[in-house]
Structures are given as structure tokens and as C-alpha cells.
Amino acid sequence: QVQLVESGGGLVQAGGSLRLSCAASGRFFSSYAMGWFRQTPGKEREFVAAVNWRDGSTSYADSAKGRFTISRDNAKNTVSLQMNSLKPEDTAVYYCALDYPQSVFPSWFPHLYNYWGQGTQVTVSS
């Protein structure tokens, strides 16, 4: 049974930073990727960043490039998203996702991910 547990959301002022973490439990017998998506009311879930567990390669949405950094901890099966220079438009519920067994990398589309965390709210005030 695979489970994803997120932590680290909250309220921050514009220009500030937050770090999200996601711990994956379960056993993995083939390659996989982990990603972060976000969603605001009335909008579709949006890709933010992903990391290929095998080689650590990463992919970012244009909105995240230069401000967000995704990283993995192989030993702990944990993925983190460091978010700097936050803007009010970054306000959303952020979801951790697991593409396992891995389909294709980078995986920008929610339907390619099989497992999802419960979501964590990030609010950036102006």
C-alpha cells in the first residue's frame, strides 16, 4: 500500500519562502517519479515540478523556474519543494504525486500519476 503524506504548507507574505515535504511509504520495485501539482478553486490541477527518482533529473513549470527547487532524499523516500520569492498567485492547495510504475519523464499531466497526497494549503499574502 503506497501512501503519500505532505507537510509544510502555511501562510507567508509575498517574497517569503516555504518548504513542502512529502514522504512516500511502501515498497518500490521499479522506477518512479514524484511531482508537485497545485490547484485553486474552479481551475484544473496544474503541474509545478517533478523529479526522476532514478537519476535526479528535474522538470519545472515556467511559473516555478528560478524560484522553486524540487529535491529528493532516496534514503527516506521523501521529496521536497523549496519555494522562494513567493507571489500571491502561488496561493493554492499543493499536492504531492507519485508516478509508479513510471510512465514517462517528465510527467506534466495529472492522469499519469497513480498516487496522490491529501494536499496542503499554501497562502501568499500581498
Image (tube, grey):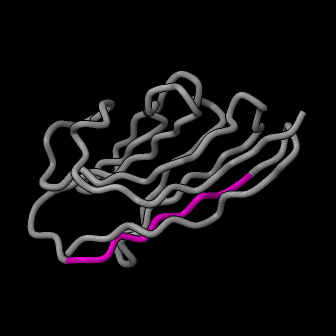
Residue range corresponding to the magenta coloring = 18-26
Count the numbered circles shown.
0
Q: Quadrant of the N terminus?
A: bottom left
| 47 sits left or right of 82 in the view | left
**Foreground of the two, 46 or 63:** 46
Q: Quadrant of the C terminus?
A: top right
| 51 sits left or right of 102 in the view | right
122 relative to 91, above or below: below
| Residue at the outermost top position | 62
| 15 sits left or right of 56 in the view | right
Q: Tell me where residue 118 appears, x and y as whole percent.
A: 46, 60
Please tell me whether residue 113 belongs to the stretch shown in magenta. no
Q: Tell me where residue 70 appears, x and y as whole percent.
A: 50, 49
Instruction: Determine which quarter of the picture holds residue 8.
Output: bottom right
Instruction: Determine which quarter of the picture holds residue 41.
Output: top right
Q: Tell me where residue 11 appears, x and y as whole percent.
A: 80, 53
Which residue shows up at 56% across the image and 52% down it?
81
Would you say the magenta stretch is mainly helix, strand or loop?
Answer: strand
Please tell me whether residue 19 belongs to the stretch shown in magenta. yes
Which residue shows up at 66% across the image and 36% down it?
67
| Residue at the outermost front position | 42
Q: Tell me where residue 59 appears, x and y as whole percent.
A: 40, 35
Which residue shows up at 24% across the image and 36% down it?
111
Which residue shows up at 32% across the image and 70% down it?
3
Instruction: Determine which quarter of the picture holds residue 19.
Output: bottom right
